[in-house]
Amino acid sequence: MKIIVLGAGVIGVTSAWYLAQAGHEVTVLERQAEAGMETSFANGGQVSAGHAEPWARPAVIPKLLRWLGREDAPLLFRPRADWAQWEWGLRFLLECMPGRFERNCRALAGLAVYSRDCLRALRERTRVRYDERSRGILHFATSDREFAELARNAEAMRTLGIERQVKSAAECLQIEPALRHSEERVAGGAYTPQDESGDAHRFTQELARSCAERGVAFRYGTVVEAIEQEADAIRLQGGERLLADAYVVALGSYSPLLLRSLGLKIPVYPLKGYSITLPLGAAEPMTAPEVSLTDEAHKIVISRLGNRLRAAGTAELAGYDASVNPARCNAIVRRIRQLFPGLGGITVVERWAGLRPATPNNVPIIGRTRLRKLFLNTGHGTLGWTLACGSAKALADLVSGRKPEVAFDFLA
């Protein structure tokens, strides 16, 4: 079949790869000049199958009350005259209920492990390189209360088949010696040895090149104006119409805006995240972490990407504003220097903000819509890099009329 994929982020490019591998003729439309230039550009770098949990959980509700009015809060709600924002927020609170949280965990866990396996197979086949590290992820706590909560969560995740090892403070420091110099005591943590990290932007660009070598056509600088009624054609800015046998919407946070004219409503809203990137000189690598980390207290993820250190976190409901708020980035900088004082001399810090396409339950929307030719692969929120390959391979199976290999509640 002739298939058009809308969007060349990590979700769109992996979709194109697996669709091409399935024998389809694929064209990718992207408004930016290159692949991976928006949400995939500077994320936290974790492929965190062992930590694929929704933000919406019972324990977050009292934290939301404590975070109200704090500019540096991990989750910040900026009220707008936008019903979609309020509706998303109310549905998020509903998804915090215990039964829903467990259901969503189960869905994410299965897809995340499948996706990690798909990524490894793809890497072996293509030899694509992206500063990948297979040293696991250490989720650490800096208070006894948080450590106890991590231990309880680890036990619950084991029932879902997720290996999450509870580690004492001493064991955490053995896994990541750079934490020995932290100005705040490490109380303990949970370690997922099978998890990985890497540069999602570099991966997306390298895979896009591999796709192009295998016949996938990329049209950069191309703005999609509309999907015509009944998904019979794509209309571009300037009036050009493109026809295909199937269309895949992988436009991240912008997916619901394009679908609205077709009468399709999906619960996806932008959740702005921030990151900082520190260039490591000749002296800093000894004081920077080697293992990918998650800081429970500040909801920050930290990954070593070659000679750079990436730290990302926080979530902000602020509509489609992608501007960088210095206060939120500076909070991440302060925390990194608190955890790794030896990096305090680095003055050049790259600051970035991106819009994560979030559903209230963090579970992505994948599959065929009620329009026969139209498929969706969007709504991955903070787990886009983790779920990309598995989501794309499953989507390619659905488009090809096959049953995906992973159990998931796909659109039908």
Image: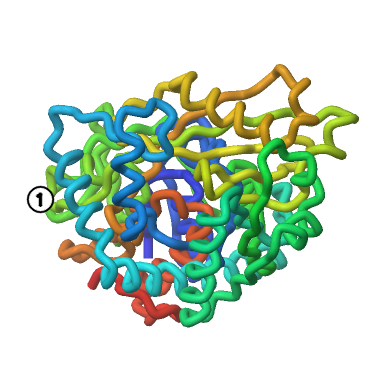
Q: Quadrant of residue 260?
A: top left
Q: Relative to residue 60, is residue 353 depicted above or below?
A: above
In the picture, the quarter occupied by the N terminus is bottom left
- Percent x, y for residue 170? 77, 59
Q: Quadrant of residue 261?
A: top left
What's the residue at 49%, 62% (across, down)?
A: 149
Q: Relative to residue 187, is residue 75 depicted above or below?
A: above
Q: Is residue 93 visible?
A: yes
Q: Relative to residue 246, is residue 405 depicted above or below?
A: below
Q: Is residue 23 visible?
A: no
- Percent x, y for residue 279? 74, 28
Between 127 and 304, the residue placed more toward the observer is 304
What's the residue at 33%, 26% (across, down)?
A: 321
Between 148 and 199, the residue placed more toward the observer is 148
What's the residue at 84%, 28% (across, down)?
A: 281
What's the residue at 47%, 82% (across, down)?
A: 159
Left or right placement of residue 382 versus residue 65 in this view: right
